[in-house]
Image: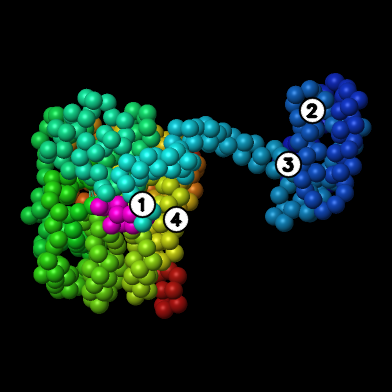
Amino acid sequence: MSEELDQYTRELLDHLYDGRGEQDPEPEERTRIDSLLAAAGQGERTAPIVELFRALQDLRDRQGIGADRFGIAREHLAALARRHQEIDEHMVSVGGRVGRALAIVQQANARVDEYLQRKDVEAPSGIELWDRVLENQQRIRTSLGMDDAAWNSFAGQIRHAIGSVEELAGLIDLPAAAVADIARVTKNYRMRLTPYYTSLIMPGEINDPVMLQSVPTGEMVDNAGIEIPPVAADHSPARLVDQFYPRVVTIKSTNMCAMYCTHCLRIAHIGRKDRVFSKDAYSEALDYIRANPRIRDVLITGGDALVLPNSMLRWLLEQLDSIDHVRLKRLGTRVPVTAPMRIDSELLDILEASNDIKPLRVVTQINTAREITPVSQQAFRDIARRVFAVLNQAVLLRGINDSRVKMWKLCETIQEACVRPYYIFNCSYRNPQFAHFRVPVEKGRDIVESMYGNIVGDAIPRYIATAGGKIPMHRSNVVGRDGNDLILRKPWNGEEVRYPDADADVYGESNFSFARYRS
Ligand SMILES: *Cc1c(COP(=O)(O)O)cnc(C)c1O
Ligand code: SF4
């Protein structure tokens, strides 16, 4: 009788009955196989059959005991194999499952095992560290004399924001030399941490990734090099407007942020002196957009767009929604990370109302899993329920996210907060102030490419260098061509595969698909 089994199952059976199993099994092995055999013959489940075949394969491989040594006829196993294929909805054979799929999965598992072991140790999130963050909050609140109302409101966070090194030194342990140096640097560069953001700094951590982002160091003035400021004249066709692309513009709606980043691209302009822009300024920006029907997408950035009062945000969004050719909007903000209390129901209602008219995305910047706490996670999830998408633009920063473990963890953690990894920016060469944060491109590529095949697809960001526009930095996976075949390299293990390209003649035929109905 023909076995009617696929190649993998035949190979597996050949292996189990190759006659080279000279050993006899121990009595307890015999008992185990007998009971597996009995279980495999019953019921409507594939697992007992798989378990039997795996056990037999294991005995054959490790101890040289063939299936015949248990007195099992080959035809009996073949019948069980046929049974497996009958039960399985997709007709997967037991040979395919045991001989191929399980081995392939096992091999792939090895690629992430190291990450799984290291992620919570090397890159703990603010959720995992929450107990310690709460201790920090207790200490900071007492020291600043903040009650619940003050802590839980954006106004309270801004009113109590830490702007001097003396204040900061009272809240986190800073060595004396650091205090002196920060005092020197903050003459030139604004420092401001919300009490909440300060509570994410872990005492005793030398290069704390939150502190690195928010507390300026001596390097900012000592680094060699000359700042190449953005040439406003090149990119600002109208008051408050920046334009790199024909269909997307930004409105730089404020120069203020809740927290001032040490790696800010606009460090020369942002946060220098708080300024409230006039309605005239916004009107001129809107006039420019209104007069340019190519413009489809408008980003309200800053500074930080959510530093604007709700009334101003509502007005700006309404203005944009009233322009016919503007089809989408974005808001640029780090506030859900630096002062998540800002995300209240009034703001959420404004976002939802605008999103109902034309899709609104919120674009944020999260650079380390540490910045996702139960509070910021909730803020992001609340926003995500009300708008089209929440996107993250991380900056690749030394000591903050420049390893596979840290970046994978960041991307997975923000995704669980309903934030989609969108870009990873290479840290700009234009500012000597933060040259010490720069990471080599090759390293950045390794980090981003290592995600393919190991992280779900919609958690993988694009790696970008900004140089008069955004330039994608992905190394090509196309390593060669042979005739019409491309030679592609799998980013996760370097394996090369042949990939036939489309037939150019077929592609060149003008008459295809629906066009064929016309001729
Ligand atoms: C980043 C940026 C944009 C938008 O870029 P996307 O690739 O569409 O996200 C537009 N204008 C300016 C000035 C920008 O910096
Ligand atoms: S939030 Fe953005 S604009 Fe504000 S300081 Fe940070 S990087 Fe600069």
From the image, tell me which residue sits under label 3: 95
Q: Which residue is mark 1?
A: 147
Check the image and report above or below for 141 versus 283. Answer: above
What residue type is disc 1 on?
Asp
Residue 151 magenta-highlighted = yes
Helix, strand, or loop for circle 2?
A: helix
Q: Quadrant of residue 446?
A: top left
Q: Amino acid at mark 2?
A: Leu
Residue 148 position in % (x across, y down):
38, 53
Q: Earlier in the sequence, mark 2 or mark 4?
A: 2
Q: Position of residue 73 (x, y in %)?
A: 90, 37
Q: Are marks 2 and 4 in contact (CB under 8 Å)?
A: no
Three-letter code, disc 3: Gly
Nearer to us of marks 1 and 3 is 1
- Identify residue for label 2: 59
Label 1: how many Cα within 10 Å (few below 14, some 14–19, many 20+)? few
